[in-house]
Amino acid sequence: MDSAAINSFIPTLDQVDSWYEIFTLLPILISLELLLSADNAVALASLAKSLESSKLRARALNIGITISLLFRIFLILLSNLLLKFIFIRIFAGLYLIYLFFSNVLINPELQNSESDKNMIQNKYKFLKVVALLSITDFAFSIDSITTAVAISDQYILIIFGALIGVLALRFTSGIFLKLLDKFSRLETAGYIAILIVGIKLLLNTLIKESILPDYYFYILILFAFIWGFSRKESNT
């Protein structure tokens, strides 16, 4: 649901006469972004969690999300050309679905044990996590960028919206990094949200007439998060 708040406000922003009027809407936009970026934030937090220290996790998030912002701006500026190629959206959807299967259905304990044997390659592991963060956030943003470009030609406003979304995402992903240690099901719930977003992206790309309204998918994501917060770790 990344940048959904900005997309809904873009027609309104197109009609304002000054930047002052836009800034008066900022508290609403930021509040909505903090709420609507939860699925993306859990996904990124789950990927960053594989790093050993909180310092490395924070650094990976900072670098990965910054790279993704550059990808977003590049896609926005060249949207008239790039978004004509549906394989970009198909790739993004398949990649998100792959993330779910590779992290949930493959035995996580086996993955962890293999990573423990390769402590010497921590530098490469860090770079791998940064790359995954960048690609994952970019894949999440493709649907919202497509929608934003379709309803407005004000690229500066769309980029402005992407910047707010990234800042909100960095804030919420930091929060979820801490929550992942407290709620044992939350990480799996995050990957279920990734699966739902991936399926939604593929359906919207391959089928012209939508089978289900978008809010059906958002309800499924909400149920996934309710389940994710249903079991708390007892650290006593």
Image (cartoon, rainbow, N blue to C red):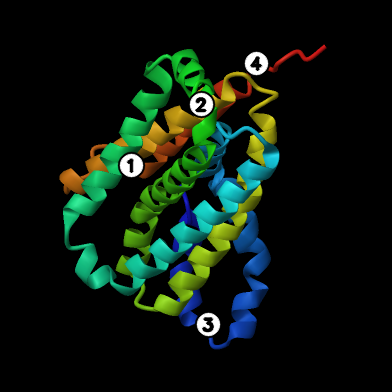
Which residue has dot 4 on it? 231
- Whichever of callouts 3 and 4 sits on the residue coming sooner in the sequence is 3
- Whichever of callouts 1 and 3 sits on the residue coming sooner in the sequence is 3
Q: For residue 54, what is the image quadrant? A: top right
Disc 1 or disc 4, which is closer to the eye?
A: 4
Amino acid found under the numbered disc labelled 3: Val
Which residue has dot 2 on it? 189
Q: Are marks 2 and 3 in contact (CB under 8 Å)?
A: no
Numbered mark located on residue 213 in the image: 1
Q: What is the CA distance from the residue labelled 2 to the residue labelled 4?
A: 11 Å
Mark 1 secondary-structure assignment: loop
Q: Image point 45% across, 14% down: which residue? A: 110
Disc 2 or disc 3, which is closer to the eye?
A: 2
Q: Is residue 149 above or below residue 197?
A: below
Q: Image point 50% across, 31% down: which residue? A: 190
Expressed as whole percent of the image width and height from the top left, the position of residue 41 reads 55, 43
Amino acid found under the numbered disc labelled 2: Ala
Q: Are marks 2 and 1 in contact (CB under 8 Å)?
A: no
Q: Is residue 123 above or below residue 169?
A: above
Which residue has dot 3 on it? 16
Expressed as whole percent of the image width and height from the top left, the position of residue 136 reads 41, 45
- Whichever of callouts 1 and 4 sits on the residue coming sooner in the sequence is 1
Expressed as whole percent of the image width and height from the top left, the position of residue 83 reads 23, 62
